Image (spheres, rainbow, N blue to C red):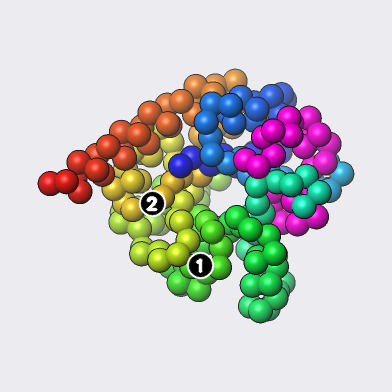
Amino acid sequence: MIWVFTAPQPVKGETEIIKDLLQAGVQKVVLRKPDYTAQQYTAMLEKIDPKFYRQIIIRDNCWLYKSFRLGGVHWSRANRALLTPPQLQKWVSNHPHSSTGVHALSEITALDGLFNYLMLSPVFNSISKTGYEGRFTGIAPTVKYSRLLALGGVNEQNINLLPCWNFSGAAVLGCIWQHPAQALNKLQQLQRQWKMGMEKKMENETK
């Protein structure tokens, strides 16, 4: 399972690249533009074919999730902190297929089962954030109810490690958007290496 986060800043031809990635089999694209207004997100979504909306996750904006019938909401840590645990549970239950990022093992324990997807980061040294070094390489902690994705520094050279580390998938950002013209080629490399990692995991399980 491979997800792609959008770059925080606008990218030339971005909606066309997103369409190409979705057509090529990326499971989800997370629209994450911290400085975007609802109007800017709306303008972006209106450039994307509605047939792809179920594969699109939007950061924090529950209204646009419902309005466009998107595939889910990605909850930022900041927005989670604004709600009490009962409030958060109510909001998440009303917005199926929600995801959120986690940066400590204690967060995994606390949020397992509340969100469909948890994204642990940084696993490897970040590509897009200088000095944001990986802290979670190796076997992933046990998750009982959610699916755990690796985030941070994932590229075509290390994604094959993740299946054997018990990650359900990977979320990428810098690997795709560092050179947008190569985005589709990068995704295809990621897909091949992920498949190799899954085959290795299955091989190990049958020994």
Provide the secondary structure element on which disc 2 rests: loop
Q: Is residue 54 above or below residue 110?
A: above
Q: Is residue 136 above or below residue 37?
A: below
Asked if residue 63 lies left or right of residue 164, the reply is right
Q: Position of residue 20 (x, y in %)?
A: 61, 24
Disc on the earlier residue, 1 or 2: 1
Q: Residue at x 63, y 78 (%)?
A: 85
Residue 185 visible in image: yes
Provide the secondary structure element on which disc 1 rests: loop
Most prominent secondary structure in the magenta stretch? helix
Q: Residue at x 40, y 66 (%)?
A: 144
The Cα atoms of the two marked residues, 1 and 2, are separated by: 16 Å
Crowding at mark 2 (Cα within 10 Å: few <14, some 14-19, many 20+): many
Q: Which residue is mark 2?
A: 167
Q: Is residue 1 magenta?
A: no
Number of marks present in the image shown: 2
Q: Which residue is mark 1?
A: 113
Q: Position of residue 101 (x, y in %)?
A: 55, 58
**Which numbered tag is attached to residue 39?**
none
Q: Is residue 155 above or below residue 105?
A: above
Task: Say which of marks 1 and 2 sits in front.
Answer: 1
Asked if residue 129 lies left or right of residue 75, the reply is left
Disc 1 marks a residue whose amino acid type is Gly
Q: Residue at x 59, y 20 (%)?
A: 181
Question: What residue range appears in magenta?
Answer: 41-65
Q: Contact, CB < 8 Å: mark 1 with mark 2?
A: no
